[in-house]
Image (spheres, grey):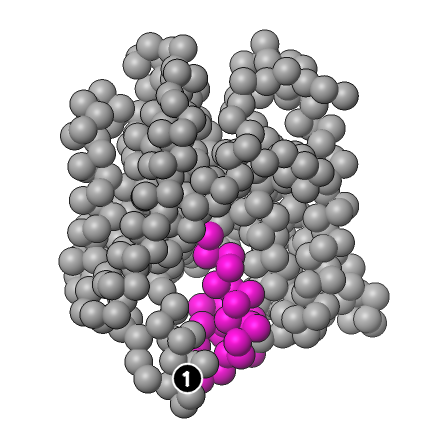
Amino acid sequence: MTLKTSRIESIDVLRGLVMIIMALDHTRDYFHISHSLLGASLGPTDMASTTPILFFTRFITHYCAPVFIFLAGTSAFLYGNNKTKSELSKFLFTRGLWLIFLEIVINSFIWRFDFGYNLIPLQVIWAIGLSMVCLSFLIYLPKKVLLCFGLILIAGHNLLDGIVMQGNSLQSVFWYILHQRQKILLESGQAFLFAYPVIPWIGVIVLGYCFGAFYKSDFDVALRKKWLLRMGLGAVVLFFIIRGINVYGNLEPWTLQKNATYTVLSFFNVTKYPPSLLYLLITLGPSLLFLYGIETVKNKFTNFLLVFGRVPLFYYFLHILVIHIVAVLVILANGVEWKTLISTNDGLSVQSLAKHGHSLIVVYIVWIGVILLLYPFSKKYMIYKAANKDKWWLSYL
């Protein structure tokens, strides 16, 4: 079935690619034994415990969040092409609030299957939602001012790395939201994890919004490709220069390791929480080069990626739910009693299920299986959305 659409295929292909890669990271979360033994934030990137293939499995998924949020800004620009600033602002504000709601109520549950909501992790959907709310006000700024603002947030936020807050005061919580990954425990026993501090993510969505101008219908394709090549190569070169100097741009400097391989791993071990300048350069730079290379490519593989790229929110929640359910079923099939799984506060969380984890080979096999399972459902939803553009609520899903 051929559907007429005004969507930019190369953008959807890139988004689809990172959505598939995202599933690898989340499959590793639930299935890889090192997640439990080494810790979610240590294992894959800890030079004392990782392996090259484990590091690569984590590093390749670094591209997901930056591209997802960057293209959210690009999509906002393209959506607003035929809208007034007021209409676009209202849409961004309401959709941002909707995403924050989904993060707290839906995403927190499907990640942990915890009816008591004892821990609410504020992750990428939260970051996109809050960034959209901010963008709803920022779009009134002149384009050049907006571009400078985004660049300053991304390039300068590492100057704030030395500011560390403690406790649950309003000032501290505000800082956790902005720039410090932190978990807080309330007197009620409920906990919040501010996993995605938003200052740099706001910068990313702002740059993505400005980037949308390259995809206006009257923009020259050859000129766009020239700019994609320049910006992509420029970001990559800048990464190597700044990382080589090893003074600024990342929370942790790279260091000499036990051999050359691990020294290279240390060099590429960039900080995600919050995303450092170097993290964003080495993820967004190659992503722009991918857009340069994929501009006119159309084949069965790009059509496959398009499906996931056109239903990102639907796919995001569905893939977490499926991976989580499969992880539980595999454990039960191995003879573990369900009462054992829910006997601790961790319940059916990542940390609990990973104790029964498997090798990376199993992770990759499960990942491929999940992608193939979700493809027909995602395609059906893609077709439904394209055939029902008059239904306003679909733009929120």
x, y percent for residue 30: 63, 62
Under mark 1, the amino acid is Ala
Magenta residue check for 177: no
Q: Nearer the viewer, residue 381 or 107?
A: 381
Q: Nearer the viewer, residue 287 or 125?
A: 287
Q: Main secondary structure of the magenta part?
A: helix
Residue at (37, 43) in percent of width and height = 229
Left or right, residue 377 beside residue 165: right
**Magenta region, residue range:** 35-63
Classed neighbour count for the residue bearing mark 1: other residues with Cα under 10 Å, few (<14), some (14–19), many (≥20): few
Residue at (65, 46) in percent of width and height = 319
Q: Residue 360 falls in which quadrant of the image? A: bottom right
Residue at (25, 48) in percent of width and height = 154
State the SS at label 1: helix
Question: Disc 1 marks which residue?
Answer: 260
Left or right, residue 352 beside residue 191: right
Left or right, residue 65 beside residue 275: right
Residue at (51, 64) in percent of width and height = 58
